[in-house]
Image (spheres, rainbow, N blue to C red):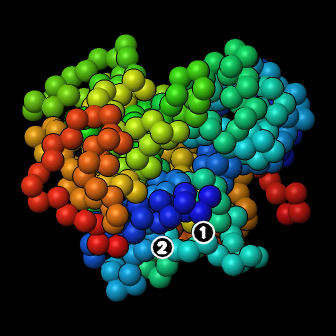
Amino acid sequence: MGERMDAQDIIARRVAQELHSGDLVNLGIGIPTLVANFVPPSLKVFFQSENGLIGTGPIPEQGMGHPLLTDAGGRPISALPGASTFDSAMSFGLIRGGHVDVTVLGGLQVDAHGLLANWTIPGKMVPGMGGAMDLVSGAKRVIVAMQHATKNKSKIVRQCNLPLTSARPVSLVVTEMAVIAFPDGKATLLETAPGVSVSEVIAATEAELVVLENVTQMKL
Amino acid sequence: MLAVSVDRAAAMIPDGATIMVGGFMGVGTPERLLDELVRQNKSNLAVIANDAAVPGKGVGKLFDAALVSRLSASHIGLNPKAQQQMLAKQVDIDLIPQGTLVERIRSAGCGLGGVLTPTGVGTSAAEGKRVIEIDGKPFVLETPLRAQFALIHGFLADHLGNLSYALTARNFNPIMAMAADTVIATAEHIVPVGVIAPDHVVTPAPLVDYLVTNPNG
């Protein structure tokens, strides 16, 4: 459990460094939600909740929640000063229309070309895609925040065998081992986590990785 | 607009009707109308909603009582009963990307022949649909989605039927209020005309056919 928490922290901390002042950001459930914990207060980032809010704040103290102010999972949240609310057509207009600067989502598989599968395991898990297909198709930058492997099986694969979320490749994948981008449609290793070697990343990755000479270490 | 009791409102909805229900995970859902549909033991409802909520809340109540034969929604992952009924083939579920779902409803309400969206191109969401190129980019043609009844929930309703909404309880409600033959609304508070300033009306009164009276009003 402790190791798992560490992996999530590494991922969330590294993804937080991708956000800039003024960005409109949508965080998915799971590890992506943790990213908000690592955004320094000096950074003025707007977080969108796709159920109709820009300016989401921390989870309110027990007894201080409002039943009409929730996140996309229906849990109570708060709204920061300057927040705005809107309907679902506006919310997804923001997403598809390229007004969301960064979306951070979880992943089941990302392939060698950056294509993402993250919404269903046919026969096992059929929850529906929710807003994931719109987010991956429309946000300016798409960052996948996920563990490198599940049950020792690489989640960065040659080709997704799970149904795709979008035909558009993602911008960046951040795992507890590595940061990978897809210039020219090829999975390319940019950074390794502290204490992780390039050869360890290659060994843990099913997809072929382009390894540049200047692979750096994540600064966490 | 006619003011009606909740039992009369629900009685207008026949078995087998297609209903749109506002709300997002049960937030901004006309709970009293759904409770009454359950009490009147409707059957075979075709439901259009963002999600299946959770058991005991919002649209989830309709699955608890097994009143649904068809659901068009973007997400059912937090309602195990809806998933069980889907796997048992008791409910036919059409999963639609959330932005596409709301635009299909919006296009029906706005008199459009559908929308062209980049969402779903090259995925299973586009299977069997026309893909049209505009300026060299592929878009899926998504058709309008209408219902016989829209069941919506506002924060304030005035005596004419003007509606305003609160916080994240707005979601699909104002969009659905445009896209059904008959619109039935509930509200947290019913207030005199004038309390909702013209600039704060989100759903104009002529769209609302029936306003459900509050029990203590």
Comparing A213 with B163, the one in front is: A213
x and y percentages locating residue B112 in the rendered image? 35, 31
Q: Chain of mark 1?
A: A
The three-letter code of the residue at mark 2 reads Asn
Label ID, residue A77: 1
Q: Is residue A103 visible?
A: no
Mark 2 Cα shell of 10 Å, populated few (<14), some (14-19), many (≥20): few
Tag 1, which secondary structure?
A: loop
x and y percentages locating residue B34 in the rendered image? 78, 40
Above or below, comparing residue A70 to residue B186 in the picture? below
Residue at 37% x, 13% y: name it. B128
Mark 2 to mark 1: distance in Å? 14 Å
Residue at 54% x, 47% y: name it. B172
Label ID, residue A37: 2
Residue at 53% x, 39% y: name it. A151
- Left or right: B8, with B156 as reference point: right
Mark 1 Cα shell of 10 Å, populated few (<14), some (14-19), many (≥20): many
The three-letter code of the residue at mark 1 reads Ile
Q: Is residue B193 visible?
A: yes
Of the image marks 2 and 1, the number of the one nearer the N terminus: 2
Residue at 74% x, 76% y: name it. A62
Comparing A58 with A203, the one in front is: A203
Above or below, comparing residue B156 to residue A40 in the picture? above
Residue that extends furthest to the bottom in the rendered view of this protein: A42
- Left or right: B118, with B89 as reference point: left
Tag 2, which secondary structure?
A: helix
Label ID, residue A181: none
- Left or right: A33, with B87 as reference point: left
Comparing A203 with B148, the one in front is: A203
Q: Which quadrant of the figure has residue A39? A: bottom left
